[in-house]
Amino acid sequence: MSEPKRKIIPKKHPMPNQEAEVRKNNFDEVALGYNNETAIAEAGRCIQCKNKNCMEGCPVDIDIPGFIKKIAEGDFEGAIKIIKEKNYLPAICGRVCPQESQCEKFCTIGKKNEPVAIGRLERFLADWELSQGVKMPQPALSNKKKVAIVGSGPSGLTCAAILATLGYGVTVLEALHVPGGVLVYGIPEFRLPKSIVAHEIDNISKLGVEIKCNYVVGKLSTIDELLDNDYDAVYVGTGAGLPTFMDLPGENLNGIYSANEFLTRNNLMKAYRFPEYLTPIRVGKRVAVIGGGNVAMDAARTALRLGAESHIIYRRSMEEMPARAEEIEHAHEEGVIFNLLTSPIEFKGDAESRVYSMVCQRYELGEPDESGRRKPVVIKGSEFEMQVDTVVMAIGQGPNPLVQQTTPDLKTNKWGNIVADDEGRTSKPGVFAGGDIVTGAATVILAMGAGKKAANAIHHYLQNQQ
Amino acid sequence: MYKIIEREVLAPKIKLFKVKAPELARKAHPGQFIILRIDEKGERIPLTIADFDAQKGTITIIFQEVGRTTDLLGQMNVGDFILDFVGPLGSASEIENFGTVVCVGGGVGVAPVYPIARALHEAGNKVISIIGARSKDMLIWENEMKKISSELYVATDDGTAGTRGFVTNVLEELLAKERVDRVVAIGPVVMMHAVAAVVPKNLPLIVSLNTIMVDGTGMCGACRLEAAGETFFACVDGPEFDGHVVNWDLILQRSKMFVEEEAIALRAVIEGGCKCQSQNGR
């Protein structure tokens, strides 16, 4: 006799969040996470279909139905073990992965209902494990060969963890004073608490990975020097940290920040706790964030929490906005004001060169452009002036140039990204690269996927050496 | 953690530290800078390297106590550790035999000019140095500069040492009588701006710009400035620039970006911080 057919619960179990009215005044994490009961109930929504379509959408090949099954059975330890076979940073991925365009996009249940909340379940498990105290395996240093990893962002950390597990001596070289890359300087505390990032990185250190901060590759050592002296291979995961400006009149006035500067001051340097922390930030009464991506949402929501009226200025419409739906929704709930089909053309400053207003023009949508999105077309005579105290330019980041500038035989493309194949091999023997430095600004999980592939390629390369 | 192994008071509120940083000392070149952070709650500040010793593994920094962070730094002693000390950042000075080079250092700016002047001297240049300060007691490294200069001129605002007046007065006189191939000037923005006004446009003028910075590796853009109408980042495109084409007004205004916050940070110490200081009448 077959089991009676279970009734499908059409919607995900909602994520408990801090109320918008409360959270817009603090930097604490917005999403609070499932408890054990909700996690088990949500895991019960998975029908354990044969096709496992969800796995198609996972850049690091996690056995998703496998870990969900374990949760449904209440075996959290078994469940996290399955994730950790493929992903060393689950507490981070569970929070910042765009699941709606990855695993959850392909979920069978999701065809007619809301997909299983795979991301929330992953986060639940990672948090559960952190609360239990993580037991990391202690891989033996079975290999005399050493690998240097340049950059401690998601791709570098993943590559480091895998190589350490394979028995290599691994050193991660980080330019800033704490490891984590964009996870610590870019993504705000309210979306990804820094204590969580520190925990995950600590776990990677426990695998035997050495992390050296305050080490700027390209200045303290070049790639060639790393290869000549201590290391048999190098992985470059230096990311996309070069800010982009629009080259508009008045753009260098005081009060106009790159998103990188604005976020770094707040996230890495904790300027929101000035003067307890000594790095200052000033936002004034009204902040305009130019751009419509996740970084723009992060900046706009940060500005709000610093007490300002916060505006998004975006030249296309809501539909074309590249930020995750969840981020836009959160920003909206908290009171960020969206000025769509609008873009600045000039900034005006006072006698002290401090920005006080921004001249904008309006757009309408025309034919689709090469990105497939409808192209914004200027409406003639639509210029208007908007008073602002602070402007944040969040219109994308370019590749960090230091490694490329000091490694002449490393091939780059016309944007300055390092050229690498699917496995991370560059034009220079022994040098591998992946993540944003190769692809241009993308997601944490894609960077991790690239770090993983490169780790395997490095393993292969080192085994075949000699 | 980077240990302070030597500390010297050069002038009121101007101090010299030698900091143990062997890897950095091996790689440092004249013209480059470091970024330091004193402790967990500290800010990152850039300081130009005043000297380096690869053998002893030390970097020398000289700083003036002008704000909260430099005040705190000034209270540190030999044996204390600076939490973060990163570099060498920025591009090295262009050193070759240009002929006759005038090196101008104003105030604490004498410190970063020193290794450049020394390197120019070692490269065979005739180095003429002009150093200045408000008064005699604020003048630093006169002897060091003397050793590597063919001629050394001193100017003080109040005339307590050398010529009474500004370094620019001395520079103008010198340029009128001597054939000079290059000028290097480091000091307060106002001084460098004044130097730019007296150096003829056909005489190369190099200035070093110590702007506000956060990461110092090209990621934040806090240090941006305009030269010949284009935007540059002081941290990676500099810190040295052609003094004839930088937009001095913008540099001065951008340096004042956080004056109010700097005052708040200083006040926070006096009100909430260490009581012993106020009892000592400081």
Image: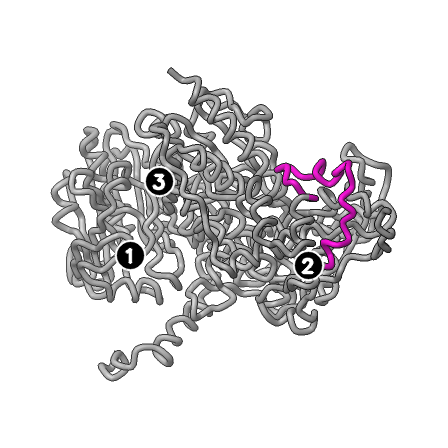
Badge count: 3
State the image coordinates of residue B110 (x, y, percent, origin top left). Answer: 24, 50
* Residue B242 at least partly seen: no
The quadrant holding residue A374 is top right
Q: Chain of mark 2?
A: A
Disc 2 residue type? Ala
State the image coordinates of residue A275 (x, y, percent, origin top left). Answer: 44, 70
**Are tags 2 and 3 found on a single chain?**
no
**Are tags 1 and 2 found on a single chain?**
no
State the image coordinates of residue A264 (x, y, percent, origin top left). Answer: 51, 54
Q: Secondary structure at mark 3?
A: strand
Q: Which residues are magenta?
A: A41-65
State the image coordinates of residue B179 (x, y, percent, origin top left). Answer: 25, 33
Name above or below for residue B115 compared with residue B2.
above
Q: Which residue is mark 2?
A: A39
Q: Which residue is mark 1?
A: B82
Q: Please say whether residue A42 is one of the residues in the magenta stretch.
A: yes
* Residue A329 at least partly seen: yes
Q: Which residue is mark 3?
A: B206
